[in-house]
Image (spheres, helix red, strand yellow):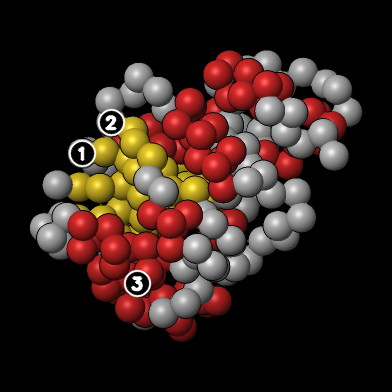
Amino acid sequence: MKLGILGGTFNPIHIGHLLIAEEAYKVHNLSTVIFIPVNTPPHKDVRELASTIDRYQMVKEAIKGVGHFSVSDIEIKRTGKSFTIDTIKSIRHLHNEDCEVYLIIGADSLKEIDTWKDITALVKICKIVTINRPGHKITSFENLEKVLGKNVTSEINKNMINIPPVGISSTEIRNRVKTGNSIRYWTPYSVEEYINKHRLYLD
């Protein structure tokens, strides 16, 4: 079994997240992609963060009807700050470690990967799949080699996926909601309805 893991705040989830997951699923022939909303992200400002329940439910709405996508509340149940190494270990334990885990991240995250908790241990228990994002294209792996070594860095480079630029961000969606602008087609319609129904991102 080949499990793709896509973590994030999903504040809110949008079309770009779904495109990334679908591309990784196809390119690496994954069995499924599991979306994992974080509880408290260790590297992000949480002042505009919707509740864990709202973010989880929005992901659930966004992937409804897609058989090869699922959502997990593993980090929400754990509470506290969410560290990737702990999540991957838990996922492997749940599947009796009889699986290959592909961690899907954006190129912006790759630039700060040396600050992640136990990164050298993490790359031993999962494969890193990086998605090139607008404005964050990685052109040099020199710093990464210093942290992870040449072989691991070479594999990360080989697993990188290029997708067409998608000029959509959760920040921009929140700003549009706050200013009364439409977010139609920026996120699945069911997510837009959820945001409107629960009056998210208005304050």
Mark drawn on residue 140: none
Q: CA distance from mark 3 to mark 2?
A: 24 Å
On-image quarter of the C terminus: top right
Please give the name of the residue rendered at 37% of the width and 79% of the height, measured from the top-left corner. Answer: 120
Regarding residue 143, the answer to whether it shows in the image is yes
User: Circles 1 and 2: CB distance less than 8 Å?
Assistant: yes
Q: Which residue is mark 1?
A: 31
Vertical side of 102 occupied by 170: above or below: above
Q: Tell me the amino acid under the disc marked 2.
A: His
Near mark 2 (Cα within 10 A), the count class, few <14, some 14-19 or many ≥20, is some
Q: Tag 2 or tag 3, which sits nearer the N-term?
A: 2
Q: Viewed as shown, does residue 96 lie left or right of 193? A: left
For the residue pair 177 and 122, the one nearer the viewer reads as 177
Q: CA distance from mark 1 to mark 2?
A: 7 Å
Please give the name of the residue rendered at 63% of the width and 18% of the height, measured from the top-left corner. Answer: 193
Q: Viewed as shown, does residue 48 lie left or right of 153? A: right
Q: Which residue is mark 3?
A: 122
Q: CA distance from mark 1 to mark 3?
A: 21 Å
Mark drawn on residue 68: 2
Please give the name of the residue rendered at 37% of the width and 63% of the height, measured from the top-left corner. Answer: 87
Q: Tag 2 or tag 1, which sits nearer the N-term?
A: 1
Residue 41 x/y as whole percent: 59, 61
